[in-house]
Image: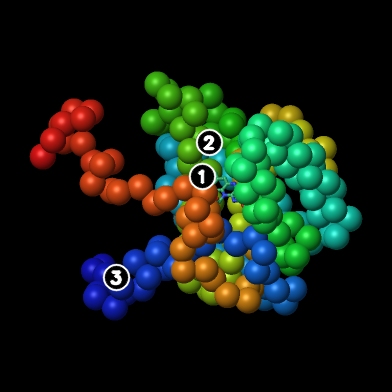
Amino acid sequence: MDINESERAAVYKTIFARRDVRGEFLPDPVPEAILRRILTAAHHAPSVGFMQPWDFILVRDPAIKRRIKDGFETAHREAAALFEGERREHYQRLKLEGILESPVGICVTCDRSRAGPVVIGRTANREMDLYSVVCSVQNLWLAARAENLGVGWVSILHRQVLHDTLRIPSAIVPIAYLCLGYVRAFHDRPELESTGWLPRLDLETLIHHDVWGGEG
Ligand SMILES: Cc1cc2c(cc1C)N(C[C@H](O)[C@H](O)[C@H](O)COP(=O)(O)O)c1[nH]c(=O)[nH]c(=O)c1N2
């Protein structure tokens, strides 16, 4: 099956228009059929040895979201203390989550023993299951953008908060807490770029030929 030109353009448009969404969420509910399409895209991500180690916890209960938000606030205070001077002020001005505003939270987890002790592709590198779950998060993020839905990844959270609040068994690893919902608007550029936190790096400086540092 070939991808035609307009389909190709749609994929690149989605990649470049995807944003991390924090402050622009609308309360409008996400229709079940659309949520199911996004989760199906996540479930069709590549995974080491076809392990499919992911689960998706859908969080809609305001009391549970409140506990996650409290966990964010703790970790956010700790983070602020690690920056100094103007950098700290800039950090504190950033909106870095939309936990309460987004209608659905999705915690994506990794079941490290899902396919038994020996998994194709994971024998030399045990962490490949974790990376597989991140592939699923990226599929989810892009599918959501294609549905004109925003996603924000909140990692300013101690893992234990997710275990305790969402009753995740200790053998399961929470990989991502995502906020999902419709948005007022998508920013054209990453907010960490437009607010001057960091620039987008020049791709040319990141490409190496044959060996690290090798020139073309
Ligand atoms: C693993 C991981 C973890 C986080 C993020 C991303 C990823 C990949 N990002 C979003 C991140 O800041 C954002 O992707 C970059 O700034 C680039 O912006 P766009 O995603 O292109 O809008 C993110 N953003 C935020 O506001 N709070 C957070 O805790 C996190 N955590």
Q: Mark 2 points at which residue?
A: 130
- Give the residue type at disc 1: Val
Q: Please, which residue is most extreme toward the left here? A: 216
Secondary structure found at label 2:
helix
Q: Is mark 1 within 8 Å of ligand 1?
A: yes
Q: Mark 3 points at which residue?
A: 8
Q: How is the image coloured?
A: rainbow
Secondary structure found at label 1:
helix
Q: Please, which residue is most extreme toward the front here? A: 85
Residue 189: image x %, image y %? 46, 63
In this view, 125 is above or below 159: above
Give the CA distance from mark 2 to mark 3: 29 Å
Give the CA distance from mark 1 to mark 3: 23 Å
Q: Which of marks 1 and 3 is nearer the N terminus?
A: 3
**Numbered tag placed on residue 199 in the rendering:** none
Q: Which quadrant holds the C terminus?
A: top left
